[in-house]
Image (cartoon, rainbow, N blue to C red):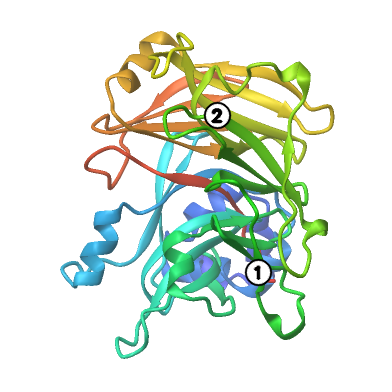
Amino acid sequence: MESSPINRLPPDSLHQIFSSLPLRDIMVSRSVCKFFNQLLTSQYFTEIISTRPPLNLLALRPPHHHSHRHNNGHAANIRPHIHVYDPEQNQWYRFNLDFLPFRSPQPVASSSGLIYLWGDSIDLTESSSKSLVACNPLTRQFKVLPQLGSAWSCHGTVLVDSVNRVMVLTELAALYYSGTVIANQWLKFSSNLPSKPRSPVLMSSSVFALCDVGSPWRSQWKLFSCKLTNLTITHTNWVCLEKHEWGDIFDIIKRPRLLRGNGDSKLLMIGGLKSTFSLNPACSTILILRLDLESLEWEEAGRMPLDMYRGFQESSKFKVFGGGDRVYFSAKRMGKLAMWDCWQGWRWIDNVPGYADGLCRGFVFDAKLTLMP
């Protein structure tokens, strides 16, 4: 590369040339050679393009058997990584996580260009507690959040909002970290939810979660919310959101899940559309409902086509993830994902990597070449 004419150009000129490329092309250019990688990962170049709009990608969480193999040492030669999907290009990428000094990193959430993951210490003599880490795989930078006990990583759901405030939520308690707390510590609150929170979402300075308030024989789902400004010294103040006009909105959906909608004023609820009101009814398709948090009005956002739903109808279990303008669906033994795009409708995604049984989990990753805060 030393004899190449491009190597004779001054760094400022090269930075100017590459800064005119779209972010997607910059990511590809970094893998061309070592010289390009060093040039395009420098702090100066990163600051130049830090205001570039992010790429809206889907990141897949590693399958459980993947982490077990790492913990047992059977696949120590495999570099830790995360698979991401670009819906605009219909293409899969692989981002390495080998810059992290942790064993078996488990990505769980993302916000503002950062991926949050649990990691085990590389020192086998240390305790089994996990660390919650924020990292940017594009800039290969990371930051370790204050230490947490291992029980939180096993039973807690990690939530992150658009300004990187973090909450780890369980049925009994919640931990909250804003990055500006005195002594850089987590704040702990007891939770007064009536049952285990299902698919909680942190957005618009509030936490939203579904709870089953029914009996052991029949589920009855309710939507609860808690404003971050209402966190007290002792507990979180959850409020049940309901309106008389909603009618039987929760009765027509089987096993509902919540996802973040587009912006900070929309919330999505996804589940099977019940065919009857019997005790254990079959579903006719999968329904996507959208709640406007300002007017508290529901509307139908999407309905899975029947020919696509047949693949999920035959599966005993399926997952829903994503958010914003796109929702993704996976099921056992399917080998592909279904995607709903609020502008382009429904389609299949093939060549899903790393999942033998086809049951994937994931989250939205807005990839940006930004430095760690």
Reading the image, the residue beneath label 1 is: 371
Q: Residue furthest bottom?
A: 125
The answer to which image quadrant residue 184 occupies is: bottom right
* Element on which disc 2 rests: loop
Q: Nearer the viewer, mark 1 or mark 2?
A: 2
User: At which x and y percent is residue 325?
Assistant: 62, 31
Q: Is residue 86 left or right of residue 192?
A: left
Tag 2: amino acid: Gln
Name the residue nearer the viewer: 344 or 239: 239
Total marks in image: 2
Q: Is residue 211 left or right of residue 373?
A: left
Reading the image, the residue beneath label 2 is: 220
Along the polypeptide, which appears first: circle 1 or circle 2?
Answer: 2
Tag 1: amino acid: Leu
| Dot 2 crowding, Cα within 10 Å, few <14, some 14–19, many 20+ | some
User: At which x and y percent is residue 181?
Assistant: 76, 77
User: At which x and y percent is residue 74?
Assistant: 15, 68
Vertical placement of 161 versus 243: above or below?
below
Q: Are marks 1 and 2 in contact (CB under 8 Å)?
A: no
What's the mark number on residue 78?
none
* Rendered residue at 31%/90% (across/down): 125
Vertical placement of 48 versus 100: above or below?
above
* Rendered residue at 30%/44% (across/down): 353
Vertical placement of 112 versus 11: above or below?
above
* Rendered residue at 49%/33% (across/down): 215
Q: Is residue 368 left or right of residue 93?
A: right
Name the residue nearer the viewer: 28 or 245: 245
- Residue 243 makes an appearance in the image: yes
Which quadrant of the figure contains the C terminus? bottom right
* Rendered residue at 59%/39% (across/down): 210
- Residue 3 makes an appearance in the image: no
Which quadrant of the figure contains the N terminus? bottom left
